[in-house]
Image (spheres, rainbow, N blue to C red):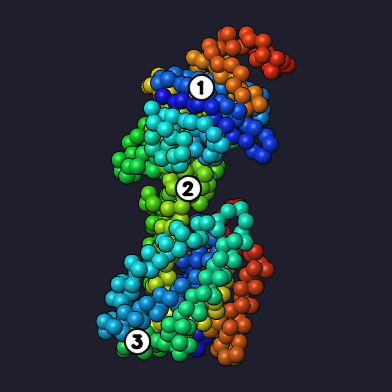
Amino acid sequence: MIWLETLIQGILLGGLYALFAAGLSLVFGIMRLVNLAHGDLIVVGAYMILIIVSILGINPFVATFIAAPGMFALGWLLQRFVLNRTLGDDILPPLLVTFGLSIALQNALLEGFSADSQRINAGALETASIPVGSLSIGIMPLLTFATAILVIFGLNQIIFRTALGRAFRATSDDPITASLMGIRPSSVFAIVTGLAMLVAIIAALYLGMRASFDPSIGPVRLIYAFEAVIIGGLGSLWGTLLGGIIIGVAQTFGAAINPEWQILAGHLAFLAVLLLRPRGLLPRAVD
Amino acid sequence: MLKLVKMCKSFGAVCVADEISFEVSKGQALGVIGPNGAGKSTLFNLITGNLPPDRGYIGFEEQDITRLPPMKRVRMGIGRSFQIPQPFHRMTVFENLMVAAAFGRGLSEAEVIDDCVSILEQTEMVPRANVLAGQLSLLERKRLELARALATEPKLLLLDEIAGGLTEGECQKLIATIRGIHRTGVTIVWIEHVLHALTSVVDRLLVLDFGRVIGIGDPMSIMASKEVKEIYLGIDV
């Protein structure tokens, strides 16, 4: 029974990793841009929610809604004025710029909020659980997982069912031809990053409620997100969820065997998948 | 309708457009011929705005479009098909048209859906509407190229070697489709190596060589001129 509980915990933890990774996956899938600052941008989001919660004294979920437009704008501006200039045949410029941005964000947060760890207070929700048979499942992990599914479902609806989504896919396929169809690739990319930051603020909400955070944790979170994206198959959002679940399950089983193995087990699962399926489990990108 | 004045473009020391000037009036069909590397596709890139010119002027419907970005030119009514079909591979044929129609005309998808259906009928692509563009045959890709250019509702249609690589029968069908489009009043500029396809549609021919216009006029007299014969020596006319 303990194993079943571990398995469920792992799957639900996968939801959190999928939330971290969904924005990364979206940006990579559409513009082949690896955003090394994604983890730090999530941490920025967590501080935004924290500030709104402590100033207005409101529920963190409501605070997330208030922070969302700002986060979208941040992503839009970042892409429009910085990252669009780095895109091209060479993959190095975006890596260097986002790496620099990552360091700058960490230090700015350190300057503004000190290195003390913070937490977003979610009240009774933090410890609430529901009994399922002889098991008890935490409401918070369940909520995280449900949100991850909802977010990925929503993103897929946008990508595959709307005019905007078709513009995303057309631009992803061939920006030059897309521009001849009246699409402005730079604006499309700005909207994509804006959308990725909306997902990031949702990830930030759960990150802040479930664990303590400080300005330096972005890159560590980013590694799990990367692993989830890569295991899942580049460009597939459901694959990213699956990748998150695999990392989550590996970590909880690793921890159940020996607490020191938690992190290692996740990375080993990542390597194992790469060894067996180098293109990921659900690859969408053909090139 | 379309006016180029002394357009110049060089890649390093290679001049691919050397003071190109010509005009196309509304409803006309102009054929563009010339050996490989003469600068034909470059000419289209200059007209669509994918390449910035070094010098010169392009006007479209009496407006200066020399510095306009490609998407603005599409909205003004300049549509283009590529020599090597470049569909959005991971989207269906119908989605390819929807993107072109909605963004090329600045309308919502609901407003363009009927037009997309009639373009599918016009280009005989109805049975393939829900197939991914990456899975189409060459003729179908060429038809999709044409259909997608039409979906942007062009007043001026630029066709880049759309008949190349097709069998005679396929070519005849495509010519019939293009004639139909021309009859609806769309102005056409058509680059083509398949001369009989070209001359069965266009009113005038323009000959390019080394980035220069070396002749423009009615097809018979152009093909009879000495300079053109020299360039095409050995090529079956």
Please tell me if label 1 and label 3 are on a single chain: no
Chain designation of label 3: A
Q: Is residue A163 above or below residue A8?
A: above
CA gap, disc 3 to disc 2?
42 Å
Question: Which three-letter amino acid code belongs to the residue tagged 1?
Answer: Phe
* Residue B161, position as x, y percentages in the image: 57, 28
Q: Nearer the viewer, residue B105 or A101?
A: A101
Residue holding disc 2: A170
Is label 3 in a helix, a strand or a loop? Answer: loop
- Kind of residue indicated by mark 2: Ala
Q: Chain of mark 1?
A: B
Is label 1 or label 3 in front? 1
Badge 1 local density, few (<14 within 10 Å), some, or many (20+)?
some
* Numbered label attached to residue A121: 3
* x 35%, y 42%: residue: B106
Is residue B28 in view? yes
Q: Who's the residue at 53% across and 47% down the image?
A: A174
Above or below residue A171? Residue B178 is above
Q: Which residue is mark 1?
A: B22
Q: Position of residue B192 (x, y in %)?
A: 58, 24
Q: Chain of mark 2?
A: A
Q: Residues within 10 Å of mark 2 (few under 14, many from 20)?
A: many
Measure the C-alpha gap from mark 1 to mark 2.
Answer: 33 Å
Q: Quadrant of residue A285?
A: bottom right
> In this rendering, would B62 be left or right of B191?
left
Query: Residue A86 at x, y = what percent?
Result: 55, 58
Element type at mark 1: strand
